[in-house]
Amino acid sequence: IDADLTSLFNWNVKQLFVWVAAEYRTKTYTKNQVILWDYVVEDVDEAHILLKDEKLKYELTSFEKELRNREINLTLSWDIMPVVGLLKIQGGQSSNNRKITLPQKYVKLPS
């Protein structure tokens, strides 16, 4: 992740809630959305998010076991939490989305 969100800060921004969501289709459901990672940015000095090889904060699982060889779209989004005024849900979304295809086979790693 390389996201510079410093331009979102002004006098009325208390913090940003930032997350990465995976969206995909399955035979069971046409639209699935799962949050994989999130972070609260409390200061403009923390607003340039630069992460490499970051592990998932939340697991991507499917009870229907329909994720094998599935294409998923990853999107970075954020909500702006103001000092005063109304919270705007789904405040913004990165135009730099990533599409990946999950593997056909999975291996269990030793714990």
Image (tube, rainbow, N blue to C red):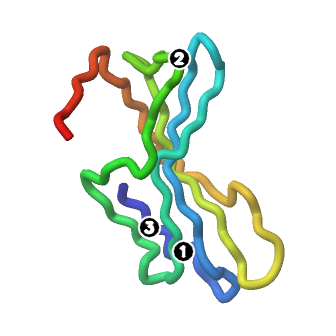
Q: Distance between the residues labelled 3 and 2?
A: 37 Å
Contact, mark 3 vs mark 1 (Cβ under 8 Å): yes
Circle 1 packing at 10 Å, graded few (<14), some (14-19), many (20+), is: few
Task: List x then y, in percent, for residue 7.
Answer: 54, 74
The residue shown at (36%, 59%) is 2
Up the image or down, 15 lies above or below 57; here it is below
Q: In which quarter of the image is residue 31?
A: top right
Give the amino acid type for the residue marked by disc 3 in the picture.
Answer: Asp
Circle 3 packing at 10 Å, graded few (<14), some (14-19), many (20+), is: few
- Mark closer to the observer (1, 2): 2
Identity of the residue furthest to the right in this view:
85
Q: Label 1 belongs to which residue?
A: 7
Up the image or down, 34 lies above or below 62; here it is below
Q: In which quarter of the image is residue 85?
A: bottom right
Task: List x then y, in percent, for residue 78.
Answer: 59, 60
Task: List x then y, in percent, for residue 63.
Answer: 52, 22
Mark 3 or mark 2, earlier in chain: 3
Give the amino acid type for the residue marked by disc 2 in the picture.
Answer: Glu
- Mark linked to residue 64: 2
The residue shown at (72%, 84%) is 83
Q: In which quarter of the image is the C terminus?
A: top left
Say whether residue 102 is left or right of residue 74. Answer: left
Up the image or down, 88 lies above or below 106; here it is below
> Element type at marker 1?
helix
Circle 2 packing at 10 Å, graded few (<14), some (14-19), many (20+), is: few
Mark 1 or mark 2, earlier in chain: 1
Q: How many marks?
A: 3
Identity of the residue furthest to the left in this view:
110
Q: Label 3 belongs to which residue?
A: 4
